[in-house]
Image (cartoon, rainbow, N blue to C red):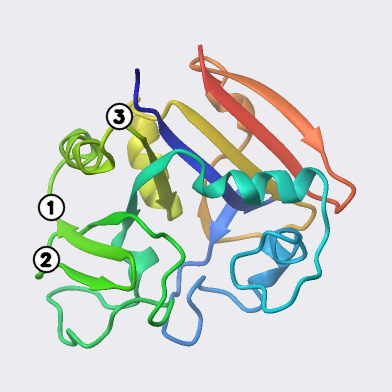
Amino acid sequence: MQQLLRVMNFNVSSDGIGAGEHQSLERPFGFEHPERLFAWAGATASWPMRGDSGGSRGLDDYFMRDFARNVGAEIMGRNKFGPQRGPWQDHDWRGWWGQEPPFRTPVFVMTHHTRPSFTLSDTTFHFVDGSPATILEQAREAAQGKDVRLGGGVTTVRQFLDADLVDTMHVAVSPLKLGSGLRLWESPDELLDRFHLEVVPSPSGVTHHLFWRR
């Protein structure tokens, strides 16, 4: 059975921007108030950081529940892991997520500066250098027959799209413009030569874009 490479619950603005260009420890997304992009997800009953039993059900919650379905490994870019650049200066930094990261699978962090793997709770981070195809092969082996989630950020998703390795993609487009930053696309129509597209509006105000390979 084919192991899919899936982009899931990826958030962009209406002008296609998923992150700012000036990431820091204080600004993980590179701009102020990033919750404007993913407020729809935080409002759902299945939001993994939810500390109570509330939250919405329905379409948005379906996508949040789907986040872990049949996923055996994740690939992410170094900027999603943390704000450091160049050779690692601080090996005590173990990501934005504290002692219990939400991935619960092996995670392959793409970087030109490798470092030893480590485990937090039920997530193991591996720091790997290589082409998208090579790293995907490693992640598929670790996923043990399940799919691989491509977590981002924008530059990493674009690398795998450019290498024609993405099988399915869910992008939640929020009804706001950021004006400048790292852009996933000028228009989702750019991908229609390779993907089918279905667009589903949500009562929360976001529009879910569902792509699957032709």
Marks 2 and 3, the one that precedes in the sequence: 2
Q: Which mark is residue 163?
A: 3
Please identify the quarter of the rendering in which residue 38 is found: bottom right
For residue 113, the mark is: 2
Residue at 51% from the left image edge and 11% from the top image edge: 214
Name the secondary structure under disc 1. Answer: loop
Q: CA distance from mark 2 to mark 3?
A: 22 Å
Please say whether residue 14 is visible from this viewpoint. no
- The answer to which of 36 and 212 lies nearer the viewer is 212
Q: Which numbered disc flags the more N-terminal residue, 3 or 1?
A: 1
Residue at left 38%, top 81%? 99
- View extreme (right): residue: 203
- Report the amino acid beneath label 3: Ala
Residues packed near mark 2 inside 10 Å, few (<14), some (14 to 19) or many (20 plus) = few
In percent of width and height, residue 104 lies at 39, 60
Asked if residue 192 can be seen in this view, the reply is yes
Marks 2,1: beta carbons within 8 A: yes
- Across and down, in percent, residue 194 comes to 48, 16
Query: Residue 91 versus residue 119: which sits nearer the camera?
Result: 119
Identified at 34% across, 27% down, the residue is 3
Q: Is residue 128 left or right of residue 146?
A: left
Mark number displayed over residue 129: 1
Q: Amino acid at mark 2?
A: His
